Image (spheres, rainbow, N blue to C red):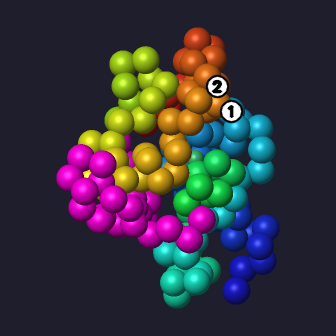
Amino acid sequence: MASPAALYRLIAERDHHRCAYCLITEENCGLQMHIDHIIPEVAGGTSTADNLCLACFSCNVHKAAQQSGTDPATDEIVPLFHPRRQRWIEHFAWDESNTQIIGLTPCGRVTVAALHMNNPTVVRARRRWVAAGWHPPKD
Ligand SMILES: [Zn+2]
């Protein structure tokens, strides 16, 4: 079993030093990222690389032990985005100002809402990063 520091490095490098949900970079965030259990430990999720991703404080705290949510457009209960099994670009997009994340699918919409991915604090910060040319990610 890898040490916590080695595991962090592995996950951070694989996730390009970005939150796997809102794509905030470690540099823009200015805070230590968290290692998120995609399937929460309380639901049987393991601490193995395929169930871990990098997550910013805000996404990690809002996600907590949630695994699903109600799609605001259809009222259906759908699973949250799974960064290891799904591709971000298929479920999310930036709006024209590049400051708000749009959920393109039920999974995307549920995840944007559950993780508060467009909270006013981060939207204000994104506005500044866009002006500085630090956002959105190019890939
Ligand atoms: Zn995030």
- Residue 42 point in image, percent of width and height: 58, 83
Q: Secondary structure at mark 1?
A: helix
User: CA–CA distance between discs 1 and 2?
Assistant: 9 Å
In the rendered image, residue 14 lying in the magenta stretch gets the answer: no
Instruction: Identify the residue at horizontal 27%, vertical 42% (top origin).
Output: 104
How many C-alpha atoms fall within 10 Å of the one at disc 1: few (<14), some, or many (≥20)? Answer: few
Q: Quadrant of the N terminus?
A: bottom right
The reply to whether discs 1 and 2 touch (Cβ–Cβ < 8 Å) is: yes
Q: Amino acid at mark 1?
A: Asn
Q: Is residue 90 visible?
A: no
- Residue 92 point in image, percent of width and height: 35, 42
Instruction: Identify the residue at horizontal 20%, vertical 53% (top origin).
Output: 74
Which label sits on residue 122? none
Which label sits on residue 28? 1
Q: Is residue 2 above or below residue 61?
A: below
Q: Secondary structure at mark 2?
A: helix
- Residue 13 point in image, percent of width and height: 61, 55
Residue that carries the numbered disc 2 in the rendered image: 125
Instruction: Identify the residue at horizontal 69%, vertical 42% (top origin).
Output: 26
Q: Is residue 69 above or below residue 111?
A: below
Instruction: Identify the residue at horizontal 64%, vertical 25% (top origin).
Output: 125
Compared across the picture, whether 44 is left or right of 97 comes to: right
